[in-house]
Amino acid sequence: MNTSKKASIFTLASTLMLASCGAPNIISTPIANIDAIPLKTKTLTDTQLKHWNAADLTSDTIPGMSVEKAYNELIKNRKGKSVIVAVIDSGVDIEHEDLKGLIWTNKKEIKNNGKDDDGNGYIDDIHGWNFLGDITDENLEYVRILKRLKPKYEGKSEASIAAADLEEYKLYKEVTAEYDKEYNETLQNKNRYELLFQQISGAHKEVSQAIGKENYSKKELLALNPTTTQMQQNVGGLSQMFGYLEEGETIPDLIKNIKDGIDHFTSSLNANLNLDLNVRSKVGDNPDNINDTKYGNNNVMGSDPKRDNIKHGTHVAGIIAANRKNKKGGKGIAQNVKIMAIRAVPDGDEYDKDIALAIRYAVDNGAKVINTSFGKYYSAHPEWVYDAIKYAADKDVLIVNAAGNEGINLDEKAVYPNDQKNNTTEISDTFLTVGALNYEYGSNLVADFSNYGKENVDVFAPGVKIWATTPLNTYEYLQGTSMAAPGVAGVAALIRSYYPNLKASQVKQIIMDSGVSTSNTVVIGGEATHTGKFTDLSKSGKMVNLYNAMILAKKLSK
């Protein structure tokens, strides 16, 4: 599942529920001084917020990746080698104004001739491949597992199960309990959001009419002199809502977020958790047969003319590579990049088969960096993905992976994909897992939704309110470890562009070793009572820093 939508929805959900109930020492500032940097107490300007992931901690007191500093002082007008970055995601709007000219083209394929000209097994794969065909919605993986096992085990006790089936039976009981819990919580959240929407939108309509505008301030709201009990309740309720708005947001923004929440929970009930849903039949393959590869099509934008379902992948692509020189809506982290669009992640959980084949497709067609901003907690065929990850490592390809958005310790609970079988044995040294940072340097440095883990998360990077491309020439703030991973993929692409002699494993180690750390105690998982040292939340204990990475890359490439 894409890992940004859940971050935004559940951050809002928790808010509304409250309302309703031995590395090289090359860092640009000495380690001893990092924690002496004054905290930024002023609200970020619109410009600062839109580009905070590129800011420099020492000069801006914003924990970005020192991107602009690197371009200004280290990269300047240097010419690098073109690097292909594969975005395995929901799809990419390859016609976006900020991505035009930056999309990979398969020069060995003749466009729309209905033939597999390059013999790679994919017909007319001009800009990538769409493993999902025309589908957009899917079940969660554990729901698919439940559907498969339910006919065999429903109503049976453990005592009646043969020893050979006992492990599978326990999995059935586990996913059944998970399903019941998730279904009930989703239904309750949907009902809660619908009630909140009714209350807040109704109050807002009356207040905005009284004030004479939609985007009023709290001061303007409190300046009203309500003459009825209803208006008093409206003012009181909305004034409380101002306390839960994020920086720069208005009451109409909150109402839109609530509506998005309703849509999300409704979609979850109708698709992700729907035991009667069977959309895979439209794709035409057997998802349990890794050798059945003749499926999908070359439409990497999907079939929806509104392109809503490819927002996630388009945002990810823009974070990596949006045109830095055209003065449009945003700047990508990396120049010299071509985006290979691979559509394999639906609104629901991805199939292991699709991900394994997508990784292999990216590797075989020249990608040097692969971004995987998705994840799930159950896997039907993890061995297929493990084999693909090892294949990428053997071919010198770096995979940059999102850690996930449940605020949990990945050393205690596995997320897929990952590069550690049974959470112990690492199968690849070219798989980099990224947690998300907030733009507040201090105790709130780690995004409240971000997963973490001393062994299973490698680094942290900006992932809260990241401004980037969305379909049909639009731009939005999205957040999640989904947004942190492509920032790091951009850093990796730049290293591979300017120092192409470095291997993928070296690029991973450079990113980890060159980061900036802090000895600060931070809030973990958004719970004020749950705190720990930032250095204990990832293997490197560091924040990714492009400036430092380029310095170290230069040293190691000699």
Image (cartoon, rainbow, N blue to C red):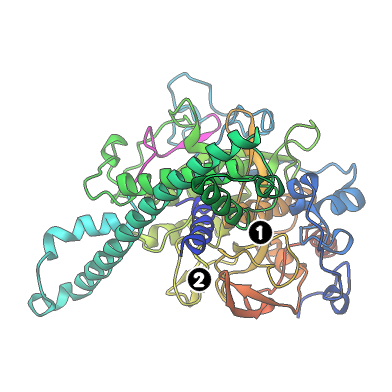
Name the spot of residue 531 as percent of width and height, x first.
62, 79
Q: CA distance from mark 2 to mark 1?
A: 28 Å
* Magenta extent: 126-138
Name the spot of residue 548 as percent of width and height, x first.
82, 63
Dots 2 and 1: beta carbons under 8 Å?
no
Residue at point 46%, 47% (across, down): 199
At mark 2, the secondary structure is: loop
Residue type beneath disc 1: Ala
Residue at point 58%, 39% (across, down): 314
The residue beneath circle 1 is: 504
Q: Nearer the viewer, mark 2 or mark 1?
A: 2
- Nearest to the observer: residue 235 or residue 50: 235
Q: Residues within 10 Å of mark 2 (few under 14, many from 20)?
A: some
Give the mark nearer the N terminus: 2 vs 1.
2
Residue type beneath disc 2: Ile
The residue beneath circle 2 is: 408
Task: Say whether residue 507 is left or right of residue 233.
Answer: right
Determine which quarter of the picture holds residue 463: bottom right
Determine which quarter of the picture holds residue 398: bottom right
Residue 403 sits above or below residue 223 on the image:
below
At mark 1, the secondary structure is: helix
Residue 134 falls within the magenta-colored stretch: yes
Residue 106 falls within the magenta-colored stretch: no
- Nearest to the observer: residue 477 or residue 134: 477
Name the spot of residue 299 as percent of width and height, x first.
47, 29
Res. 332 in view:
yes
The secondary structure making up most of the magenta span is loop
